[in-house]
Image: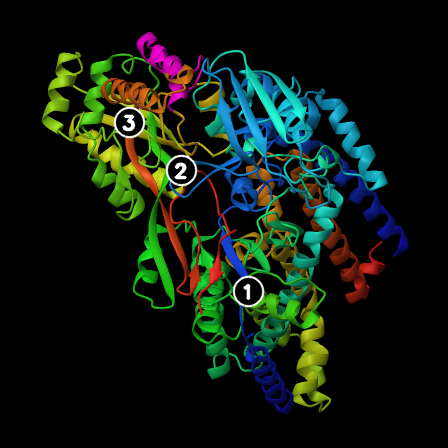
Amino acid sequence: MLRIAFSRLGSFVLTLFIVSLLIFATMDLLPGNAAAILLGTAARPDTIAALEQQLGLDQPAYIRYLTWIAGAFTGDLGSSASYGVPVAGLIAERLQVTLPLALIALVIAVAIGVGLGVMAAARPRQAPDRAASVFAQVGIAVPDFWFGILLILLFSVTLHWFSAGGFPGWSDPVAAVKALLLPAIALALPQAAVLTRVTRSAVLDVADEDFIRTAKAKGLTERRVLWRHAVRNALVPIVTIIGLQFSFLIAGAVLVENVFNLPGIGRLAYQSLAQRDLVVIRSVAMFFAGLVILVNFAVDLAYLWLDPRLRAAR
Amino acid sequence: MITQRTGLRLAFAALALFSSVSFAAAKDTLTLGLPVEPTGLDPTISAPVAIREVTWGNIYEGLVTLDKDGKVKPLLATEWTTSPDGLTYTFKLRPGVTFHNGTPFDSAIVKFSLDRARAADSTNAQKQFFEPIEVIETPDPMTAVIKLTQPSGLFVYHLAWGDAVMIDPKTVDANKTDPVGTGPFKFKSWQRGNQVEMVRNDGYWDKGVPKLSAVTFRFIADAQAQAAALRAGDIDGFPNFTAPELFGEFQGDARFKTVVGATPRKLVAALNSEKPPLDNVKVRQAMMSAIDRQAIIDGAYSGYGKAIGSHFAPTDRGYVDMTGEIPYDPEKAKSLLTEAGYGDGFTLTIKAPQMSYTTRASEVMQALLAEVGITLNIVPSEFPAKWIDEVFIKRDYEMSIIDHAEPMDIDIYSRPGYYFNYKNPKFDGLIAAADKTADDGERDKFYGEAQKILADEVPALYLFDLPRLNVWSARLEGLWENEPISQVYVRDAYWAE
């Protein structure tokens, strides 16, 4: 198992390197530059040139790439052209919003999705299954930011239970979690819907297997058969989807962050792209890519742990 | 099932806890929403409007300022005199003024601030304002003498802009993130992506102001989120509400005061005067005749906004209503096109930024131009990045549309290499003459003639003056309704009893 883990780690590092090249090249090809944007429609060419020099935009591409990569190893990702503060700190600040948001959303999505899915599979084509299927239809059809708007209208504008957006910071953890709750629900519902479907069909797939019949024949309770035998064996597809969803939740947070006006990493990505703040955007993009690769890596390891047969395969 | 029920009960208990909000008695703090987060907080090194909205007159102050009608008023200079040749300005400075960090304000500060703005490596977005300066002399700490190489009629007016605020040499490098000025509010914190907090400057030179103890600017880009934050009471007002289609909902609501103010932001559709057939003045006049400005105001801004006929805003000094020069007349447009040899029409591409009002205005123009046989293709051009690159710098476009936010900026049509590609020596002469005269009445006359030339020759289609849609709490007083310059000036704001 260790050997497999190490070979996966090797491809993890190689992928990161290729991705870093791709990100740098695409960002560099984008039309527009930060200096011209910051100086607006009154600026003259010599003023723009002066700012380009200050921001280091006049250096050749390979020097800027090497500076970036070398800096990444020491934690110095450069300074944002528009904010004027270090990029590493900027990303760290934003992660304090987006990571908890994605985690809360993931917990909600798993709780609802796996719960409803198993419930539906336990009684196929009966009322609970029908209800779960309606939920899944609606959840998949309605985008998360629209759920967000509906939640704001109900809980903030009408009931005044929550503020309509913004983030108070972690100095008051209760207020912080409260600010993340509605957006997390909005973010979680579509993912919960997907997970409901996947869980239902994965559990139904194993329901006809011989070992289930054996378990039933042993006289185990229905609940024990369901959770211990059916769900346990349906976990591989479910974990795959959860892994994919975590990346979606981080990246997909950009719309929900916008609706709830949260200072998360999604909005940082959007803003710095609009401002052509390349120093920021390439590190944010790299972070997204690294995270997706890391989660896939973790899911791979989870397979090995969940399914002993995969361990024996090598 | 028990666990589920307990869970529900817990959730409701938590919600009930959250909903018990306490209200403070006498309110002396203010939270305002703004659509765009500033990029840095130093207006002397970059252009974005959002920097000025947060800092102009609140954190930083200049020698002079503008009042709510756009008139120049003393601020850190108490008075000034101009020599008869218009080349020497002598400013008497206000005594007893200190920066937030304790640095005293004197003539050396004036010299430093203005010399920095015109230096070779300056990145001041309006560097040309400071170009006429020859030397700044400081005969004594409370007197600054500015000598110009040539008369500059708007020199003192431009000193009221954010680009000309007074800066402490010690905080030059830090101002972008930790601004220090002489203003009524001191910078407290900037939670990036969310808000900037300011607190009262207890050492402010004008005793008795500001009345508020703290002001927070919260940045909310999404129009729905702006409306929701107002209705939920998260913010006390939105002085520059960006969703005209949602503005009406607040107009009947007694909790809010809604005012449609005027701004210097002119929505104009540039016609590249070097690209045929737009090099033909008759074609440009025909296009202007084909435009029903009211239809564009209705379609792009829900009917708010004032039609303009030239590149001057109603808030600008010397404004003349030029909408009558080329009124909406599709028949006239067709005959002009025939005269120009385009009786069968032609096809044109507009590079339109993604903002909702520029997109919608482009669509209305597309329909109006189709009536006279002109086919308009709309191609999106991401603003600011792509638009500045391809339209503004490379001038690679036929037609485009953008709002020009600077007040009194008609001179851009005489700047060589400016993106309209418009050339008219007579116009250039008027702008030069207006720039040189120190007499306000004389200058108004020159600007009036310049406005008429643009209205007649149509280097751009003049559409409308963007409104400032103010929504704020019914008890809030002292904010400016109009926008003689980009501002959210909170110095005089207070809560009525």
Q: Which mark is residue B70?
A: 2
Task: Please indicate whether residue A24 sits to the left or right of residue B161 in the image.
Answer: right
Q: Chain of mark 2?
A: B
Crowding around mark 1 (Cα neighbors within 10 Å: few <14, some 14 to 19, many 20+) is: some
Q: What stretch of residues is rendered in magenta?
A: B410-433
- The residue under label 3 is B310
Q: Secondary structure at mark 2?
A: loop
- The residue under label 1 is B28
Q: Amino acid at mark 2?
A: Gly
Q: Secondary structure at mark 1?
A: loop
| B442 to B49, vertically: above or below | above
Q: CA distance from mark 3 to mark 1?
A: 43 Å
| B344 to A313, vertically: above or below | above
Q: Chain of mark 1?
A: B
**Are the residues at dot 3 and dot 2 in contact (C-beta closer than 8 Å)?**
no
Residue at 72 percent across and 34 percent down: it is B173
| A269 to B376, vertically: above or below | below
Task: Please indicate whether residue A103 sits to the left or right of residue B162 in the image.
Answer: right
Task: Please indicate whether residue A118 sits to the left or right of residue B387 in the image.
Answer: right
Residue A133 in view in this figure? yes
